[in-house]
Amino acid sequence: MYFFKRNFKTIILYILAMGIIGTMIAYFMAGNTYDYEEYYSLSEPLSTTQEDELAIKLNQEVNAELGERAASIQYSPESQYLSLDVESVSEDEVSNIKNQFDALLDDSGIGYEEGVNITIDANSDIVMKVIIIAASVILGFIFGIIQGIRNRRILSDEDVKYYLDEKTVGTF
């Protein structure tokens, strides 16, 4: 118990320092991702061939760049709405995908009105951030314990009594 009493400040200092470092790492490294959904009102109905061609172009041009299937489209013939769904991408990637999709629609000669309904949801990935911060706090505790074990300096009368098992006369 004397060990923790003597090295309490050192251990707390390491825990706080590593906690701050872990928080900064969690903030900058484990960034937010976004789910994006936008509805386009089409001037004329799409045929299934046009819809399939648009989906193929989307996969070839947009999803191929990301290396995963992040963007997809869905068409509702009853309402003539075409929806662009983008899942788990960064803010910059959302705008790039939207611009590329608008260019695909323009190249296909499809008349549309964009921005009928837009939904953006942030996925903060909170579990990953908590794991990073908790691991850094535990590392801070371990580093504080190691520093305390390595610190064998005699600084007070209590240290003389504890480490040397000798009595002191007066103040050390």
Image (cartoon, rainbow, N blue to C red):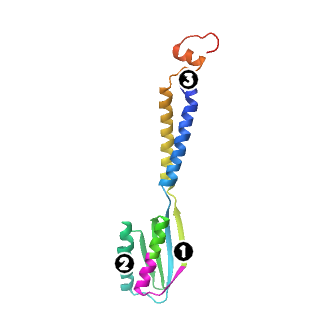
| Closer to us: 158 or 120 | 158
* Label 2 – label 3 distance at C-alpha: 70 Å
Among numbered discs 3 and 1, the one appearing first in the sequence: 3
Q: Which residue is mark 2?
A: 57
Mark 3 lies on residue: 2
Position above or below: 45 against 88? below
Task: Using the image, tell me which numbered label, if any, was put on residue 118.
Answer: 1
Horizontal and vertical percent for residue 31? 49, 57
Stretch of the chain drawn in magenta: 100-115
- Magenta segment includes 133: no
Q: Nearer the viewer, mark 2 or mark 3?
A: 2
> 10 Å neighbourhood of mark 3: few (<14), some, or many (≥20)?
few
Q: Are marks 2 and 1 in contact (CB under 8 Å)?
A: no
Nearer-the-camera pick, 17 or 110 = 17
Work out which quarter of the rendered image holds the N terminus and state it.
top right
Residue at image position (54%, 20%) is 154
- The percent position of residue 119, horizontal first and vertical second, equals 54, 71
- Compared with 36, 136 (above or below) is above
Q: Amino acid at mark 1?
A: Ile
Q: Residue sitting at 36 percent across and 85 percent down?
A: 49
Q: Quadrant of the C terminus?
A: top right
Rounded to the nearest angstrom, the CA distance separating label 3 from label 1 is 61 Å
Three-letter code for the amino acid on which mark 3 is drawn: Tyr
Q: Residue at x 38, y 85 (%)?
A: 50
Q: At which x and y percent is residue 163?
A: 52, 17
Q: Earlier in the sequence, mark 2 or mark 3?
A: 3
